[in-house]
Image (cartoon, rainbow, N blue to C red):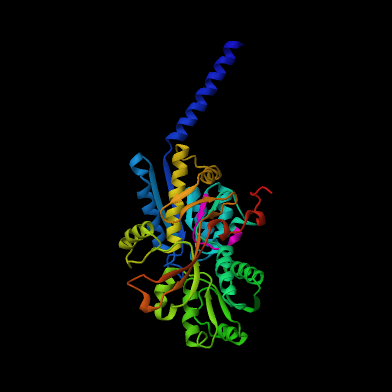
Amino acid sequence: MKNTISALMLSTALMIGAGTSAFAQDKTVKIGNLTDMSGLYADVGGPGSTLAAQMAIEDSGLTKKGWKVDVIAADHQNKPDVGTTTTRQWIDVEKVDVVVDVLNSGVALAVKNVVTEKNAIMINSGAASSDLTNAQCSPNVVHWVYDTYMLANSTGNALVKAGGDSWFFLTADYAFGAALERDTTAAVTKAGGKILGSVKHPLNSSDFSSFLLQAQASKAKIVGLANAGGDTTNSIKQAAEFGIVKGGQRLAGLLMFISDVNSLGLNVAQGLNFTETFYWDLNDQTRAFSKRFSERMKNKQMPTMVQAGVYSGLMHYFKALEAMGGNPHDGAKVVAKMKEIKTDDPLFGKGEIQPNGRKIHPAYLFEVKKPSESKGPWDYYKLVGTTPAEQAFRPLSESACSLVKK
């Protein structure tokens, strides 16, 4: 009997050892960049996010250490059903471990359910909805870069304090727009401002005339643009045609990217205030990365904060995998390791991933320069103020996430 027990124990030990060895030797990773490749957000993420992922692979040094790391990309067309179908195919057939970018909150909230069900990972740098790390949080999701709470908290508060105490919203009619208007409304009213009205517009609109006329008629001091990408640039261009700013109202781009300012040009965009968490010209490290990125982009574009977030998020993901000695292909386990390790990279600096999956770092309030203030291509922003990481995002004490211990 003793011999039999000893043999069983030895056999079990050998099996455990073999399993551990197999895990340690599994050094394969597959990344899926799920983004808008051809629509109104293509310059914000798109092929630039794929390049950022490739640069993260190269800079991590993993391939030189024997790892096999691949990246593939797909266009979700800003449709949640396309996003979820693609994600299922990727995980089940292509063996994708981590989905990145995921511009569009409607798509991201749907994809979040798939990666949770399949125990994969989503490192989201593209979608804005703060619900991803609040009421709809997941142990398989990390939300990098920005969210609607942070944007509202920074831009909304600053403008109310500067005298912009009455607001009217032009809001994109889907999950992102609703979340941004909701969070900005809360920030504005908390700061003592009031909301005079709002109007919803379809995604990817070309004609904002009726919406802008309603904003003009409201006589609100601030017209808050709760939209993004091409919708933001089109609404700003058409607002100029209607003389909204000349008439005394101010435009607040609640979510803007450097690609938007480039599209508008400084003559139109000058004086706009908005919040970002990354700008290519912040310091020597951001300049060095951005120069390398721009040289490899067909249009020589500087990286947006979404593209920078793809790079930064993956660099931290790779650190977690190395710390684990291999890829367990267990999304929740890897995300837990990512939360254990303090974040520190050249683009966003030092920070951390909170229990709800929210990556925190400073937020910067910028103002677009006048043409006379710009010293050359892509020299568009001047820094107005900085919100420390611990103040920029939703406090854990206010969190509705089930992962946060009360």
Measured as percent of width and height from the top left, residue 30 is found at 43, 48
Q: Which residues are magenta?
A: 121-131
Q: Is residue 6 left or right of residue 344?
A: right
Q: Give the quarter of the image for residue 182.
A: bottom right
Residue 137 seen anywhere in this rendered image of the structure:
yes
Furthest-left residue in this view: 295
Residue at x-position 50% and y-position 70%: 274
Is residue 322 inside the magenta stretch? no
Q: Is residue 294 above or below residue 60?
A: below
Residue at x-position 38% and y-position 64%: 281
Furthest-right residue in this view: 406
| Quadrant that contains the N terminus | top right
Q: Nearer the viewer, residue 38 or 321?
A: 321
Measured as percent of width and height from the top left, residue 217 is found at 61, 87
Q: Nearer the viewer, residue 74 or 267?
A: 267
What is the tally of numbered marks visible in this picture? Answer: 0
Q: Nearer the viewer, residue 274 or 322?
A: 274
Measured as percent of width and height from the top left, residue 206 is found at 49, 80
Measured as percent of width and height from the top left, residue 190 is found at 66, 69
Residue at x-position 59% and y-position 54%: 113
Residue 94 seen anywhere in this rendered image of the structure:
no
Q: Nearer the viewer, residue 177 or 281?
A: 281
Q: Is residue 354 above or below residue 107?
A: above
